[in-house]
Image (cartoon, rainbow, N blue to C red):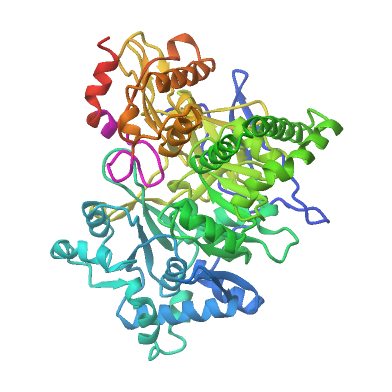
Amino acid sequence: MTTPYPTPPASSGTPVSATDYDGRPVLVEPGIRRLDGAVREVSVPPFAPPVTHGSLADLPYDNAEADPDKVVLSRRLSDGGWKDVTAARFAAEVEAVARGLIAEGLMPGDRIAVMARTTYDWTLLDFAAWAAGLVTVPVYPTSSVFQTRWILHDSGAVALVTETAAQAAALGPELAHLPDLRHVWVMEKDHVARLAEAGAPVPDGEVGVRRGMLGPDTLATLIYTSGTTGRPKGCALSHGNFFAEVDNAIELLHPVFKAKDDDLSVLLFLPMSHVFGRMVAIACVRARVRLGHAPSLAPADLLPDLAAFRPTCLLTIPYMLEKIYNSARAKAESGGRVGAFDRAADIARRYGEALEARQTGTGNGPSRALKTQRTFYDPLVYRRIRSAMGGRVRHVICGGSPLGRSLAAFYAGAGIEIFEGYGLTETTGASTVTPPLKPRLGTVGWPLPGTRVRIAADGEILLSGDHVLRGYWDPRAGGVVPATRDGWLPTGDLGELDDDGYLTITGRKKELLITAGGKSVAPAPLENWLRQHPLISQVMLVGDGRPFVAALITLDPQGTTHWRQMIGKHPVPPELLVGDEELHAVLQRAVDEANRMVSRPESIRRFAVLPVDFTEAAGHLTPSMKLRRDQILRDFAAEVEGLYER
């Protein structure tokens, strides 16, 4: 890939102050470079100084020394309650488990895999492993035996910690093929506590010696990308990568991590095996923001956790925000209040857009009449939305895919500020983030401080910064192989930069559909728009090499149940609605509305309703809810052919 730009220079190491005398965020306008009149590169200088010594392993110890009684985590109890953990207590637990790992013979640089849902023990093991000089390797608890075996073999893991005995037992037949794996420990069998006990004989200074061997350039973790095709690749992220990411994120996202509030808190329920959740967990420990872990995304489990923990910030993906909105609207419709809800939603969107206009200097903000209307609907609608999130949520960090301008404006108007971001495993999380005080709804913001974003000639997004990975793990090539080209990481994503430097994601290079007529179509905008419909669970556009674009649509069970009730019919399973003419008419109206966003050659001409949903278990979704397009095309080949046979 050729570009008209030179290799980016190394970071100067001179941070830009991110706060004024009142401790409020001060935004630094990004540097913008143009080519042929279009913005092609945007950069924001670092807000935090680079870390030149030490590692993530030091954070619990630094916190304990600085503020030993500060509550830095809360541990979820079996009865649904929460037990606070102080900085001093967490450091002591990290020390004890680190000694246990040393006592079991694990050596500096050894890889230890963790296969578990989002739990307190995950974070404890992460920091304990680092304190013992180890490298952690996350494994999704939903991974198949084959996927798990591949990650353990490729990483050369010498130890594995699973959450359940069943997970460990499933790997039993594979152990003969994993000669490096010497230890298997199980959380539900209290093996983490036993590790702490086993470490008692280890000399007091041994963990300190191990920590002293680590530096910013030391490998911290191997995170295997779930990928939409092929075998996963191990992203080799250093302690310095995480420091560059979290330190700048903490300074930028001042309301989340540094506001003058002694009870800032984050409830983490996205997978710790994903870099997004892991990065925020580390940022919370770094900033001493109380962190909690919720292991289940099922509403019956998550809603009580939200109510009991009452976070001030949530980490989520657009899919969940869409479902919260759709669920609230469905409840209003069931109670005969859908008209009021829709009016409230419209007011919230207008209020959110007015706030944006004031913050960006393009308007005066909400009018007096709009403020009055919002105040009227707050206890009727908006407060209920906030209550579903625990009642105290003021901010949401959202990533994974574009949220969309309409929904972002609604939540802003409902009193919840959305910080939307974009990034990859390879960039240790976010590379762009919505800047506080200057959002642009519908975009993924400006570069994270210390980051450069470039748009290549073919529209691909390129990234550069100290948070970009050192390379991919490849034991056959002797360790880590480079991932960047001339200092830039090719992302495989397509995007656009507007005149003020805000990035919009338009699709994936590999997902681009090219019709028989030669029209290039990015499927993501239409898919994301349609997925917000209450009757729709997932959407995938097809049409590569075909005469026109079509779509595969799966149904949302809760949405279809509610819809059937509202039209006076008994609920039936989604698979029985595939040929329902009334449902087809509703979906056709949604498709027609979506098609208004694009040109005729890009529009959806036909669609098929599938009898089953796309799921991770069936191989149709990655653990981060991305479509595995090749697998879907194989499994539903007959349905795709049917779209073009009429």
Say which quarter of the image contains residue 288.
bottom right
**How many numbered circles does the render carry?**
0
Q: Residue at x 47, y 33 (%)?
A: 565
- Quick check: 253 left or right of 368? left
Q: Magenta stretch: dominant SS?
A: loop
**Image position, residue 56 (x, y; %):** 51, 66
User: Image height check: is 286 above or below 205?
Assistant: above
Identify which residue, 153 or 30, lies in the foreground: 153
- Quick check: 264 left or right of 303? right
Q: Does the magenta run of residues contain 188?
A: no
Say which quarter of the image contains residue 259.
bottom right
Residue 222 in view of the camera = yes
Q: Which residues are magenta?
A: 615-633
> Furthest residue to the right?
368
Q: Residue at x 77, y 37 (%)?
A: 374
User: Image height check: is 377 above or below 155?
Assistant: above
**Image position, residue 3 (x, y; %):** 48, 28
Q: Quadrant of the C terminus?
A: top left
**Image position, residue 379 (x, y; %):** 73, 45
**Image position, residue 583 (x, y; %):** 41, 23
User: Image height check: is 548 above or below 621?
Assistant: above
Identify which residue, 246 or 175, lies in the foreground: 175
Residue 241 in view of the camera = no
Q: Residue at x 48, y 71 (%)?
A: 79
- Quick check: 154 left or right of 565? left
User: Image height check: is 153 above or below 228?
Assistant: below
Q: Quadrant of the N terminus?
A: top left
Say which quarter of the image contains residue 150.
bottom left
Identify which residue, 600 or 349, lies in the foreground: 349
Q: Does the magenta run of residues contain 632?
A: yes
